[in-house]
């Protein structure tokens, strides 16, 4: 298959720099607007390489919480991180009522593995780590002749959320995320909190 016949489709897992990637592709005249996927494809396209970004589970879950609470105002103000984690499967307890009715989808609390394991079995999938976005940049510079103008390559160099992860996590929080995202740790090589 020649390189110019290969298409790329982006499986956009929440809180893994997806919007930054989308913007970078646009800057390089490659539109992902119809190629970006926010759900697992039912049918995989031929001559297509799917790619995704995974992220340290502790940082990703905290980033989702902070984004929904501080930026989007979807989580009630009095909901603390530990309560949020303990009730991830009961969003009616922590989401604002109107948000729960209109927006909530369980995909926001899925592990990266849950998003990607079907793809890995059925198609060519390229997985990059949020903490190593420079490798994604190098790949697309080589494969699609992109310019080296991705301004966020150092985005994932810290464990996440401005290095303040321990301000949110106690032992219980670490254990909840470790259990829920077990496959992410095993599949993508992330260290559990007690392995550092």
Image: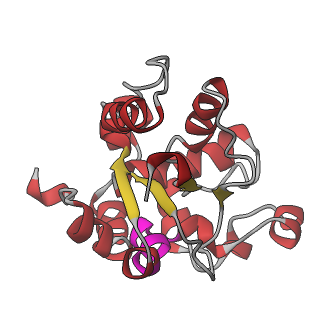
Relative placement, left or right, of 13 versus 27 is left
Residue positioned 67% across, 46% down in the render? 32
Q: Nearer the viewer, residue 22 or 184?
A: 22
Residue 9 in the image: state x and y as whole percent: 58, 56
Q: Quadrant of residue 138?
A: top left
Residue positioned 64% across, 24% down in the render? 27
Residue 18 in the image: state x and y as whole percent: 57, 44
148 shown above or below 40:
above
Q: Is residue 159 visible?
A: no
Q: Quadrant of residue 45?
A: bottom right
Q: Report the magenta stretch's main SS.
A: helix
167 shown above or below 111:
above
Q: Nearer the viewer, residue 116 or 95?
A: 116
Range of magenta residues: 110-118
Relative placement, left or right, of 51 versus 164 is right
Residue positioned 54% across, 58% down in the render? 13
């Amino acid at each position: 298959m020649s390189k110019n016949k290969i298409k790329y489709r982006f499986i956009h897992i929440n809180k893994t720099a997806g919007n930054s990637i989308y913007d970078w592709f646009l800057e390089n005249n490659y539109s992902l607007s119809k190629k970006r996927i926010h759900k697992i494809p039912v049918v995989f396209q031929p001559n297509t390489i799917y790619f995704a970004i995974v992220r340290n589970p502790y940082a990703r879950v905290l980033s989702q919480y902070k984004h929904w609470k501080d930026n989007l105002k979807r989580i009630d103000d009095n909901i603390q991180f530990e309560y949020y984690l303990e009730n991830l499967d009961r969003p009616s307890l922590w989401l604002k009522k109107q948000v729960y009715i209109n927006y909530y989808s369980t995909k926001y609390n899925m592990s990266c593995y849950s998003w990607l394991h079907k793809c890995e079995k059925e198609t060519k999938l390229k997985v990059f780590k949020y903490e190593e976005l420079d490798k994604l940049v190098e790949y697309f510079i080589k494969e699609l002749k992109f310019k080296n103008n991705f301004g966020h390559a150092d985005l994932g160099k810290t464990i996440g959320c401005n290095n303040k992860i321990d301000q949110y996590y106690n032992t219980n929080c670490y254990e909840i995320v470790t259990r829920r995202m077990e496959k992410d740790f095993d599949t993508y090589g992330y260290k559990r909190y007690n392995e550092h």
